[in-house]
């Protein structure tokens, strides 16, 4: 009896998905739980496994199709599997055995197989030298550029040789001699590709934030000297005890929670004509990936200590690289923190993450001259930006909120003593 391969149930906030690519062709043998097809939503990429072992029959939805939960993707013929086919089907396993010294995630293994790559030729940047999806994508990008450099000079060479075949050149010889020496190619390549679901969703939400909210941004600066001193003093003991590094983000999360407790409107959201005040603190941490911007959420962040926050951030980073983030990791959130400083940003105006009404922007730490007790001294300064929805948050609250974060960071004892 034929078995239907169907789209898994999608979360409530997701109406449909785009079929990215089939990994099997009609007539191919498949093994139970082997990934057959990738579905891209506006947040994550879902893998659809084979419900049973058998032979893939008719494919009903091609690459690029938009599908909904419960829709039939293909037909599987389990009765077509015979003893000889069962032994031939697990062909990927010997490959795994040859690469047993290089542990690979499913998404990385799929990229390597599709592009016929040698994993030993790619430098891994993950834990213990493990290959990540970003490593493979970077390797493919560099390989494409190298191939393009070998191809591009060919038209230029043909162009310079063309006058030799004609006795009466159309242009003066001087002009012809200048073309190859300039090294400028006449090729002007263009490529049109459809937006990914994630990129399209990000674009939609950014426009939504600007069109549906009265968005303003207030700025302040914070002296990071005490945080840096405290971190340098205890980071080795912290890492030895908790097995995770002590970063700056945990200080900002703790400071933000303290400020949110004092100004609950900034932890609220608007639903039509109602204001929803959240009695919990789910803090989103904006992360940039090769697919676009995503915001994993720290659930009940007020109940986490510094080690718990740092470990959660490390876990999010590992899931992002391996492509294993789930909807539960991304949904919800009452307040967001974004750190443009890791890319060198000095100052920016972050855009709201709807339906949240505020977002904190961190920036690069730079040594600047400041006045302390009538003396000019050099201190590590970071500019902070708070974008907020003026429909719900008044300017006074926004400024005082940012001042609270500044005070907590400039005197970290506030965070430790809860004062």
Image (spheres, rainbow, N blue to C red):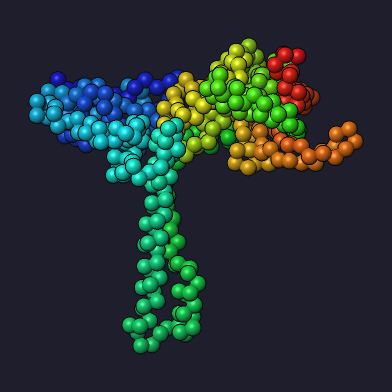
* Quadrant of the drawing holding the N terminus: top left
Instruction: Tell me where residue 361 appears, x and y as whole percent.
Output: 66, 33
For the point 42% across and 50% down, which residue is it? 142
For the point 19% across and 24% down, which residue is it? 53
Residue 179 located left or right of residue 114? right
339 to 273, vertically: above or below: below
Instruction: Tell me where residue 391 appears, x and y as whole percent.
Output: 70, 25
Instruction: Tell me where residue 204 appears, x and y as whole percent.
Output: 53, 34
Residue 42 located left or right of residue 363? left
* Quadrant of the drawing holding the C terminus: top right
Instruction: Tell me where residue 344 appears, x and y as whole percent.
Output: 63, 42
Of residue 174 and residue 167, the one placed in the foreground of this image is 174
The image quadrant that residue 119 belongs to is top left
The image quadrant that residue 152 belongs to is bottom left
For the point 40% across and 85% down, which residue is it? 169
Of residue 248 and residue 67, the one placed in the foreground of this image is 248
Residue 92 located left or right of residue 249? left
Of residue 169 and residue 297, the one placed in the foreground of this image is 297
Residue 15 located left or right of residue 369? left
Look at the image and tell me whether residue 241 can be seen.
yes
Look at the image and tell me whether residue 391 can be seen.
no
Q: How many labels does the image show?
A: 0
For the point 59% across and 22% down, which residue is it? 238
Of residue 362 and residue 373, the one placed in the foreground of this image is 373
């Amino acid at each position: 009896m034929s078995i239907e391969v169907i789209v898994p149930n999608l979360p409530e906030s997701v109406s449909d998905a785009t079929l990215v690519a089939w990994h099997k062709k009609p007539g191919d043998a498949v093994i139970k739980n082997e990934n057959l097809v990738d579905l891209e939503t506006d947040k994550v990429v879902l893998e659809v496994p084979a419900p049973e072992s058998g032979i893939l029959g008719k494919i009903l939805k091609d690459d690029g199709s938009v599908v909904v939960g419960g829709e039939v993707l293909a037909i599987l013929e389990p009765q077509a599997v015979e003893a000889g086919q069962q032994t031939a089907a697990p062909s990927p396993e010997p490959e795994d055995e040859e690469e047993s010294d290089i542990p690979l995630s499913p998404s990385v293994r799929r990229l390597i197989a599709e592009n016929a790559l040698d994993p030993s030729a790619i430098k891994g940047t993950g834990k213990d030298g493990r290959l990540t999806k970003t490593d493979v994508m970077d390797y493919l990008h560099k390989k494409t550029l190298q191939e393009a450099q070998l191809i591009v000079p060919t038209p230029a060479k043909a162009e310079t040789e063309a006058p030799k075949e004609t006795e009466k050149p159309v242009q003066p010889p001087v002009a012809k001699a200048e073309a190859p020496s300039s090294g400028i190619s006449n090729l002007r390549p263009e490529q049109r590709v459809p937006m990914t679901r994630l990129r399209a969703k990000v674009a939609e939400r950014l426009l939504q934030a600007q069109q549906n909210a009265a968005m303003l941004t207030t700025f302040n600066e914070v002296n990071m000297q005490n945080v840096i001193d405290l971190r340098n003093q205890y980071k080795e003991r912290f890492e030895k005890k908790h097995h995770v590094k002590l970063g700056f983000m945990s200080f900002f999360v703790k400071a933000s929670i303290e400020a949110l407790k004092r100004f609950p409107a900034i932890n609220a959201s608007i639903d039509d004509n109602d204001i929803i005040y959240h009695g919990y603190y789910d803090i989103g941490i904006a992360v940039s990936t090769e697919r676009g911007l995503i915001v994993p959420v720290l659930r009940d962040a007020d109940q986490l200590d510094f080690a718990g926050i740092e470990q959660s951030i490390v876990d999010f980073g590992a899931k992002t690289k391996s492509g294993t983030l789930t909807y539960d990791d991304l949904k919800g959130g009452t307040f967001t923190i974004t750190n443009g400083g890791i890319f060198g940003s000095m100052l920016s105006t972050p855009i709201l993450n709807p339906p949240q009404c505020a977002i904190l922007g961190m920036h690069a730490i730079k040594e600047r001259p400041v006045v302390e007790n009538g003396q000019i001294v050099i201190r590590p300064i970071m500019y902070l930006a708070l974008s907020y929805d003026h429909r719900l948050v008044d300017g006074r609250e926004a400024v005082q909120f940012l001042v609270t974060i500044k005070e907590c960071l400039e005197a970290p004892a506030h965070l430790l003593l809860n004062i």
